[in-house]
Image (cartoon, rainbow, N blue to C red):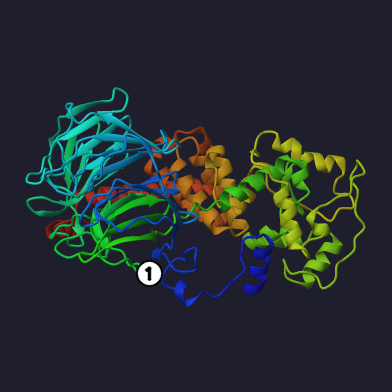
Amino acid sequence: RQAGTRSAAISALGCLPPRRCPKQSEVNGEMAGDGGPYPCWEFLDCDGEVPQSRSGHTCALHKNRYLYIFGGFDGSNCFDDLYVLDLDSRHWRKIEAGGDRPSGRASHSAVTDDLAGVMYIFGGSGSHFGYTNKRDLCEFCFETETWRLLSNPLEDTPSARYGQSIVSYRKGLYVWGGTHGTNYPTDMHRFDLCSKQWEYVVTSGDLPCGRYRHQAMVKDDLMYIVGGSGINRYGDVFTFHFGTSVWRKLVCTGTDLSDGRYAHSAVLREGHIYLYGGNDGVRHDDLQQLDLETRVWSRVVVHGQCPPGRDFHAAVLRKDSMVIFGGSNGMRRHNDVFEFHLAPKIPACTLSADLEVIFEQVQLDEAAQRSCDVFLAADNGESSQGIFCHWHLLYVRCPRLHQLVQGHMPAGARSSSQDRPPGRAQSAPVEREPAADVEGRPASSPCEMAPGDPEEVIDSLLRSVVNDGTPSDGVSSQTSRPLQQGHFVGSARAWVPVDLPHVILWHLVHYLYVETTRFGRLSADQLYRLYVAAKRFEVPRLAVLCERQIKVWLGLDNVLPLLRSSAQDGPAAQPVQDACKHFFLANYNQCTELRECEALDPKLLCELMRLHNSRSGATAAAAVGPLSQQQQQQQQQQQ
């Protein structure tokens, strides 16, 4: 068969999309939504009430769409304003919030609770850093746009500080790190959202050095701490387990971060930490990635124009992207918004599962059976069991079985299919007299319009499928009904007898559809018959899978029947026969005591005895060892 003919057949099944040449920008990366390759930076051109340029602010994301900006520093004063950016419409709005609005601050920390619909703000400092530190905890409600003071600064709370981190875990808020201006505390505090009380958390393990302007992220039961600055700059990574309150330092390799990094931004996505920007004596514009499984840092090669290097900015994770706002480059502050598009997670391939639904449904549902143009009738004596399937799929997946079907196609369908490759449309439509079934309904099998109209074939096939079709004991009765009722009389559907038992035929065709097997439903003898069928119809992968499973299942209860059958089937079953012989010889005493041993062919039994004796002789000779020269001379004299 020519490759073009094969592709046409695949196209008829709807499995092959139209081919197109890739653009130059696609060669070295996956395609982004705007036509560029992943991963890439995108500048967001926003309108509305745009915030003033600032650094040291916080960003919080609500409903994966609304970006909230609070506070920050412009070089002279700290802000107490609140803005929201609709990331879909890219429109800014200033919020005139009510309630107990927090005072202006920077280097505070923020975290959201989407289920509760609130944002929490803790700590920070006024414009005189170190002298105007904060220790209050405030809550902002997204729906009512009002502030509420949750903890009184005069009560027993964490000490006033800035540059700390805050994360949410279950029903608590965890605060760690930061600075008073001259020292760097390492205490851990938890705010219980039910009792509205602070509590001190006793920790153990590899406690990190005190630091501020680090980043904290949560995955499962762990909090990850990355970087920061204190007595020194740090580029290390620590984990804190919420259940055990144990710190652990992660030994990471890859990109050298020994110079440390602070005032950066970081997000955690699918087992990777993405770190952007920050300061190690230089303000960076790079993007680093840490694989949490291998613990290897690497620099991400990014397409597009990256934001200018900066620190004291803020970032959030949104779906498959990281959004950053503001920050400082040392000369000026920013109010720009950039979105870093990560390669989206590719959904799992469902082709096999979809085809399995189709295969199982057409065995059970008469409406779905109208999409089938082939019925493979099993060799079950007088009963009329069989498998409904599709001509184009057999053409692609099993040419030998397709050849068998070709010889049983109705005259009109066979002549049309021989004139052109499957899946190629006719130059002119062929008019056929619609056949009627026993109830007077017009038959609508795809062979009446296929293979000349593949799109209609697939449409009718997919329309007939529902999601609850599973094979059962009722398959036999359902598949025999069309024959009993005479559905094939005058129909263009091919009725093809196949000299295989129904269960073997079912598993063979099932494999052709879904490329998977269900060995658990077969006995050892049935598995062997499936192996022989796979060899006969030239389905090599299925044959290898069956052969391997037979070797796994070999035991005293089945080795002799399998040996007898494989010996009768000759060279095609030689691998199975060899495996059975090996098992027989390895368990010779037990096998010869079995009653089935008497039913073996005498020649085969003699061969097994000869192999056993030769092995026994070789083993005995190896145990005695080689004769010495004197012993050899004595034997020669005796002879």
| Residue 2 visible in rendering | no
| Quarter the C terminus occupies | bottom left
| Quarter the N terminus occupies | bottom right
Q: Nearer the viewer, residue 245 or 414?
A: 245
Q: Position of residue 434 (x, y in %)?
A: 90, 54
Q: Is residue 279 left or right of residue 52?
A: left
Residue neighbourhood size for the residue with mark 1, other residues' Cα within 10 Å, grouped as few (<14), some (14–19), many (≥20) = some
Q: Nearer the viewer, residue 395 or 48?
A: 48
Q: Nearer the viewer, residue 223 or 573?
A: 223
Q: Position of residue 571 (x, y in %)?
A: 54, 58
| Residue 45 visible in rendering | yes
Q: Nearer the viewer, residue 297 or 537?
A: 297
| Identity, as a three-letter code, of the amino acid under mark 1 | His
Q: Position of residue 577 (x, y in %)?
A: 49, 50
Q: Is residue 615 left or right of residue 363?
A: left
Residue positioned most to the top: 195
Q: Position of residue 345 (x, y in %)?
A: 44, 54
Q: Is residue 230 left or right of residue 346?
A: left
Circle 1 sits on which residue? 303
Name the residue located 67 percent from the left edge and 59 percent from the top edge: 13
Mark 1, secondary structure of its residue: loop
Residue positioned most to the bottom: 24
Question: Vertically, is 463 above or below 139?
Answer: below
Q: Is residue 174 left or right of residue 43?
A: left
